Amino acid sequence: MNGLYKEITIGYRVYDENGDKIDNNNMRYNGWSSKFDETFSVSSPRIAMFNTFAKKLFITSAYNSSEETVDDSNDNFLV
């Protein structure tokens, strides 16, 4: 299906003209190099909607928020 994405890659860096590192495209950044990038399924519970947070499912429920976990692993993702 055209426009359907199943995986995304997350990089742990912030591009900044004053960054202390330089990537392969000669752009300055702060953070972790590309060897620490991770690829996730778009339905992963580790990916949160913008301006929200992802629950840490490995921590006991005493530390989780009061929000109910939603299983959206069967949702279709279209661009």
Image (cartoon, rainbow, N blue to C red):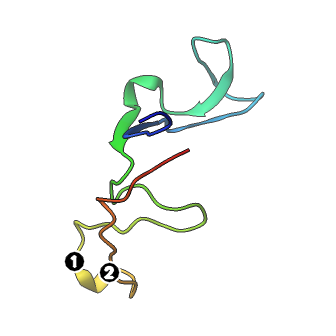
Element on which disc 1 rests:
loop
Q: Amino acid at mark 2?
A: Tyr
- Of residues 75 and 15, which is closer to you in this image? 75
At x 50%, y 39%, the residue is 12
Q: Which residue is mark 2?
A: 63
Q: Quadrant of residue 29?
A: top right
Kindly identify which numbered label has been placed on residue 60: 1
CA gap, disc 1 and disc 2: 6 Å
At x 58%, y 17%, the residue is 23
Q: Quadrant of the C terminus?
A: top right
Q: Are marks 1 and 2 in contact (CB under 8 Å)?
A: yes
- Of residues 28 and 9, which is closer to you in this image? 9
Please state the horizontal and vertical placement of residue 13, each as a whole percent of the image: 56, 36
Estimate how packed mark 2 is, as few (under 14), some (14 to 19) or many (20 or more) residues with alpha carbons within 10 Å: few
Q: Amino acid at mark 1?
A: Thr
**From what the image shows, is residue 61 above or below residue 31?**
below
Please state the horizontal and vertical placement of residue 16, each as a whole percent of the image: 73, 32
